[in-house]
Image: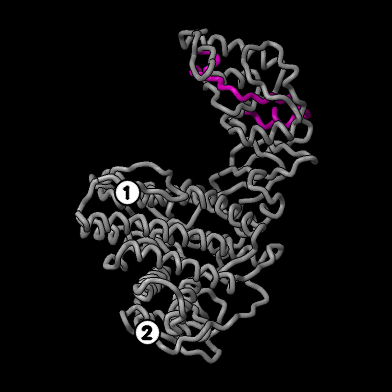
Amino acid sequence: MRFNLSSHHITRRRMTVRICDADGMYKSIRQCQDIVTKIFGCHVKFILLKNTTGDYTRMVVSSHDLFNFLQPKCDVLKLMICFLKNHVAVTMDGGLFTFLMSSNLVLNSHSLPYFELSNDKKYLLSEIRQFLNTINIFIDISKFSDVQSIIKTILMPKIMLSCMDLDHICILYTTSFASTMKKEDIKVVRVISKIKDSCIYDGFLLPVESYFDDALLSTKLTLRVCLVNVSLSIDSEELLGEKKESIIVASRMKTKEEILNFLCKFCYNFSKQADVLICQKVVHPKVKYLLKQNNVICVDRIGSIALSSLQSLFNCKVMSTLMLTDFAQYISVMNDFKFLNLNNRHFIQITSTSSTSKTLLLCAENDEELDTLAQCFEVSMALLQGLAVQPQVVYGGGCIETMIAMHLLYLRTKKLKISCTNNLWKVVDVVVKSFLSVALAIDNEHEILENFIDDSFHHHWINPKFRTRCCCGSINSNIDINFIPFIELISSGNINEKIIEAKTINLVSYADIVIHPSEVFLRNLEASVTLSDIVSHISFQILQI
């Protein structure tokens, strides 16, 4: 059977889905939900996954790692993971929340008619949008303490850091953003070292091979630099043949020996006219060796973005062909530079008063932590750029989920006059249970009986008798509030008729409070509803067979 599926994350096309029984599909979703729940939350939680043959294992802590590793047999679950991969690629984060919310919506609503369910969920989503507009918190991104609170909510679930290291990384990320306001102007360099060695440098840090002598490098007062955007390897298209309209029509050099001989001559001519070769693409190891023999520094694989930034920095042309013997028009003389030795790795620091470019040096004790820190930096910059345009946040720690759930129950108890289907209030139960399930997953080390909601502000609490603050940290338990157990709200039909509208919290600073950008939360929620509609449609078709 074929389904025509579409959303803003999945290109409209016809997809073939091997139909299994509905029970098997729900079982697969529950199993994946259990895995996601184990790593979801405000604190670092690792799980170790291995494939069916047992010959490959991976430590997983983020949605990016999890969805790239999982290979389910159920085609519906494959579709969900494909959707989530695209969602994470667009939004940089939020894959775990989106999966948990969408899977809960699917599992809690399988007994309801699909078409009415879809319309009611869209109506409730519009109600949630209006509610978020009334409770959004406006923050001042010029306050470092508020910005650091957002960065901490990104770092804490993904990497285990001491308080000192966490504060140090938050300050670096915040300073990086404040210094340029553009992610494109910040280059990330990774070095195996202690996290406290991480820092920000003006300009660019270009890696230099360790075989260069420090004494030789320190004697250079100027450097003649040449930027190249073609490959200096044996598979170079220019050396293999002329490329016209994506088709190679004539071969110039047929063997590797011919290409290497040409590259050797190129190196000989280049070394007489320049000191540094910076290549966007790959440079062959033998070419690097020959350049090194002639005291030429070679940096390759820097990418098109970094090359474009360096071109602006040097105000020079980029060499796009190797068929030259005179490189004068492509040479730029560099005066503002410094050679650095960082944990036995050599770098050239290039600076300019006319450039706002920065280099963030990230240090960690292993490659996995470095990858996580770099990924968190990308997410942080994307979120902060969004907050610069729309500086609105919502409470984290499961508090926004409980606030929305209680608001929907408040609408139900008031029985507002709305034109919708007769199943609307059943759908309210489904959505409320889904939000509460996500809130429970944030700190899944505690049982459901230990989770509560206060009746005044509708925030999430765990063991309020022993904890002085709610899960987001904005409310103190010393004030006069009562608590409603989660179990009462999740139990079918047991709705408190005395639910009131949430009171407003007035805070001067949001330092040390768990907060999330409002726009990101809403975008993840909309993606959850879209994905649940797709899966519900498929399950509805399965039941019709």
424 relative to 504 in the view: left or right: left
Badge 2: few (under 14), some or many (20 or more) residues near its Cα, within 10 Å? some
| Vertical arrangement, residue 509 with respect to residue 349, above or below | below
Residue at figure coordinates x 35%, y 46% from the top left: 4
403 relative to 382 in the view: left or right: left
Q: Is residue 527 magenta?
A: no
Q: Which residue is mark 2?
A: 495
Q: Tell me the kind of residue under disc 2.
A: Ile
x, y percentage for residue 511? 63, 71
Residue 440: in sight, yes or no?
Answer: no
Query: How far apart are the alpha carbons under marks 1 and 2?
Result: 36 Å
Task: Point out the tag, 1 or 2, that comes first from the N-terminus.
Answer: 1
Q: Looking at the rendering, in which quadrant would you find the C terminus?
A: bottom left
Q: Is residue 237 magenta?
A: yes
| Vertical arrangement, residue 139 with respect to residue 474, above or below | above
The one of 527 and 256 positioned closer to us in this rendering: 527
x, y percentage for residue 285? 52, 22
Quarter of the image where one finds residue 117: bottom left
Instruction: Name the secondary structure under disc 1.
Output: helix
Highlighted magenta segment, given as a residue range: 212-240
Residue at figure coordinates x 40%, y 67% from the top left: 120
| Vertical arrangement, residue 239 with respect to residue 356, above or below | above
Q: Which residue is mark 1?
A: 78
329 relative to 167 in the view: left or right: right
